[in-house]
Amino acid sequence: MKRNKRALITGITGQDGSYLAPFLLKKGYDVYGLVRRSSSDPFYRIEQLRLPKKIKILYGDLRDTASIDRAIAESQPDEIYNLAALADVGISFLVPEETIEINYYGVGRLTNRAMTANPKVRIYQASTSDMFGNAKPPYNEKTRYNTTSPYGESKLKAHQDFVEEYRRRYNLFICSGIMFNHESPVRHKNCVTRKITHSLAKIKLGKQEYFELGNIDTKRDWGYAGDYVEAMWKMLQQKKPDDYVIATGKSHSVRDFLNAAAKAIDIDIIWSGKGLKEIGKNKKTGKTIVKINKKFFRPTEINHSRGDGSKARRKLGWEPKTSFNELAEMMAKSDLKLVRRETS
């Protein structure tokens, strides 16, 4: 009897892992997740999807080769999806050495041990649009890299040394998904989109007066994480490994997202003032609910990010299904339900 395909997902407790795991389960995979032990509960995203019993959890760390070996030996994966990373751009400026250790050296350890155990393994590496920095949009697979953060630099080095080079030198089947911003209701609350929707929900229910943001006029290409994990899987089903920009091809500002999320839960924001003195007021109540704070500005900012995902559409047959407004509404209404449950 032919066994099911096996997938090992690092970073399975993060946003993308929580969507990729059920996607692969529906495809008939046996799914293994590499989880770093923590004093806090790392499983809340998976538990929201009610799937923890179907996922075989393995404990390990990309900084520890022995634990990587154990995870690979136990899971014997046909496919590896490396989603583990220190992914907070702002934090990467504060801990650049840790960022490089996890996002670069960790990828090297995983790739080398996986390739040694099974030369035919197929590997997906989660890359990022931050590798392009402030290049002129739209960005595609041929755009020159111009990273502006330790996070972007760590991802770029991993992409060049362990994806491009290992494909050339060892004929390894390894693909890089150059992902533009993708969000969801289980995005971490430190990320700007989730900070917005969670704060708006608390304001709507009278649990918070206002919240503060940094540069609300930066533009990003925002998609839905649930759509993007399908592209990851499709990359590893191709005859030849390659790299793909995964993006909607449309960009919106932080202000646009804030306005759309507020509208979804019947809050109308009126803006006044300029620069650091700009404020957003609830039209209905007249109360200030959004302020600008300089401390949330990044040391170096990507002003406008937009991807060209035409290669993925052409070769993978992939395209996003969820619109920007649908994404903002989904997240806002989800957080409204969450806050109601938490405060009831």
Image (cartoon, helix red, strand yellow):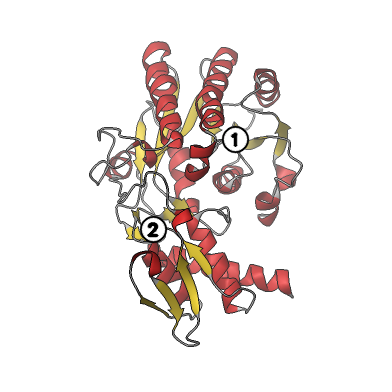
Compared to residue 25, the image places residue 288 above or below, namely below
Q: How far across and down, in percent of the image, does residue 139 sit?
A: 27, 42
Q: How far across and down, in percent of the image, does residue 171 sit?
A: 41, 15
* Image quadrant where residue 206 sits: bottom right
Disc nearer the start of the sequence (2/1): 1
* Disc 1 crowd, CA 10 A, few/some/many (<14, 14-19, 20+): many
Q: Residue at x 39, y 64 (%)?
A: 276
The residue labelled by disc 1 is: 9
Q: Residue at x 57, y 42 (%)?
A: 24
Disc 2 element:
loop
The residue labelled by disc 2 is: 215
| Nearest to the observer: residue 192 or residue 92 | 92
Farthest bottom residue?
284
Q: How far across and down, in percent of the image, does residue 28 sit?
A: 60, 40
Disc 1 element:
strand
Q: Is residue 71 left or right of residue 296?
A: right
| Nearest to the observer: residue 292 or residue 206 | 292
Q: Residue at x 47, y 43 (%)?
A: 89
Compared to residue 124, the image places residue 293 above or below, namely below
Q: Amino acid at mark 2?
A: Asn
| Nearest to the observer: residue 26 or residue 335 | 335
Compared to residue 296, the image places residue 27 above or below, namely above
Farthest left residue?
136
Q: Where does the N terminus fall, quadrant-wise? A: top right
Q: Is residue 166 visible?
A: yes
Q: Amino acid at mark 1?
A: Ile
Q: How far across and down, in percent of the image, does residue 60 sit?
A: 69, 28
State the separation of the CA atoms marked 2 and 1. 34 Å
| Nearest to the observer: residue 328 or residue 49 | 328
Compared to residue 62, the image places residue 135 above or below, namely below
